[in-house]
Amino acid sequence: MSMRITADQALDMLRSDDLVGVGMEADAVRARLHPGGVVTYQIDRNINYTNVCTEYCSFCAFYRPVGSPEGYVQPLESIFQKIDETLALGGTGVLMQGGLHPDLKMDYYENLLRAIKARYPQLHLHCLSAPEILNIAEICGITVREVISRLMQAGLDSIPGAGAEILDDEVRHRIARLKCSTEEWLMVHRTAHELGLRTTATMMFGCGETLEHRVRHLERIRQLQDETGGFTAFIPWFFQRENTSLGNFIKQEVTAVDYLKTLAVSRVYLDNILNVQASWLTPGHKICQIALRFGGNDVGSILIEENVVSAAGCHNKSTEAGLRQMISDAGFRPIRRDTLYRTYFLN
């Protein structure tokens, strides 16, 4: 196996004008880790149990402040209906997260997960980001370890990587002043891994950060993965600006070249994370196909429902047939997977 690249080398790759060369390097890593030309996808659904949030992140068009007439907490019947629709399409899990609601205590989350597991014991519950878990701990006056342990007992199966944005406090303070710090985000995932729970890692770039900030983000993810081995995948996407306050200040849109290069460098740098996801939601299907030659080995979910990015003006849609066609047309073999990247539908 080749020597891992340094942070300085990753920065040089991001600055490089040789897009094809960077892409070929990432493609070689993908081919080594995922032989046979296989690209995976998933059928699941994003369920937002509430949109009430106290963080006021400048890049979010989804949240509603406490007391807003547009704020909601989903009734259990509505969540069950969404799960039924997901299962009917062949789904195996749901990704459930929401805003940081100041009135929802530990018992709300435990009851919610228990009720879902009692009715759908086979369903994989990929729920609650690091900021949400920290919020529960703070509201209830208990430790993060206790929150995660109790959620696992109630049925939590894995934790999504949302809330990472850019793992550098200089950037975080500017775009989401009230959100958890870099160290807090890492601590939640470290604790989850120590308790035997797998999680994903994400990066939202194009929010005014420097290339150095992006490399620092990758470095922190790689260090934690070296320590715990608990991340199943890395999922980078770029800031969607429409309807957001931050969008008024960011003059430079992320280009397809910038997206592909960042994805490729992520694939080469994160040599200890098996899966790197190429996105179709924000860049669109054509760029996603190209991204499969820039290190991506997975295209994520068909996203039966997605409310957060769509609130910021992104309206790309897909179906299972559409994703399979997209993967095949790019020259790969589409295989369905579950939330933990187990491919048991070998079709």
Image: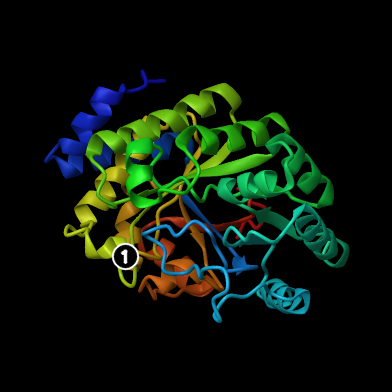
Is 1 on the left or on the right of 12, as rendered? right
User: Which picture quadrant has residue 290?
Assistant: bottom left
Q: Image point 29% across, 36% down: which residue?
A: 213
Q: Is residue 53 above or below residue 19?
A: below
Residue 342 seen in this snapshot:
no
Observer-nearest residue: 72 or 235?
Answer: 72
The quarter of the picture where the N terminus appears is: top left
Residue 177 lies, with reference to residue 188, above or below; the image says below
**Eyeballing the image, is 193 above or below 283?**
above
Q: Position of residue 97 (x, y in %)?
A: 61, 60
Colour approach in the figure: rainbow
Asked which secondary structure carries label 1, the reply is: loop
Quarter of the image that includes the C terminus = bottom right
Question: Looking at the rendering, which quadrant does residue 217 occupy?
Answer: top left
Question: Which sits in the foreground, 277 or 227?
Answer: 227
Q: Position of 87 compared to 271: left or right?
A: right
State whether residue 166 is above or below residue 278: above
Of the residues shown, which amino acid type is indicated by label 1?
Ser
Q: How many marks?
A: 1
Place of residue 50 in the rendered image (x, y in percent of width and height, measured from the top left):
62, 68
Residue located farthest toward the top when viewing the structure as drawn: 3
Specify few, some or many for label 1: CA neighbours under 10 Å numbering under 14, 14-19, or 20 or more: some
Q: Which residue is mark 1?
A: 245
- Farthest right residue? 118
Identify the residue at image location x=36%, y=18%: 3
Image coordinates for residue 187, horizontal then vertical, percent: 58, 32
Residue 328's x, y, as percent? 42, 63
Residue at image x 53%, y 29%?
Answer: 225
Q: Residue furthest left?
A: 17
- The residue sitting at the front extreme is 67
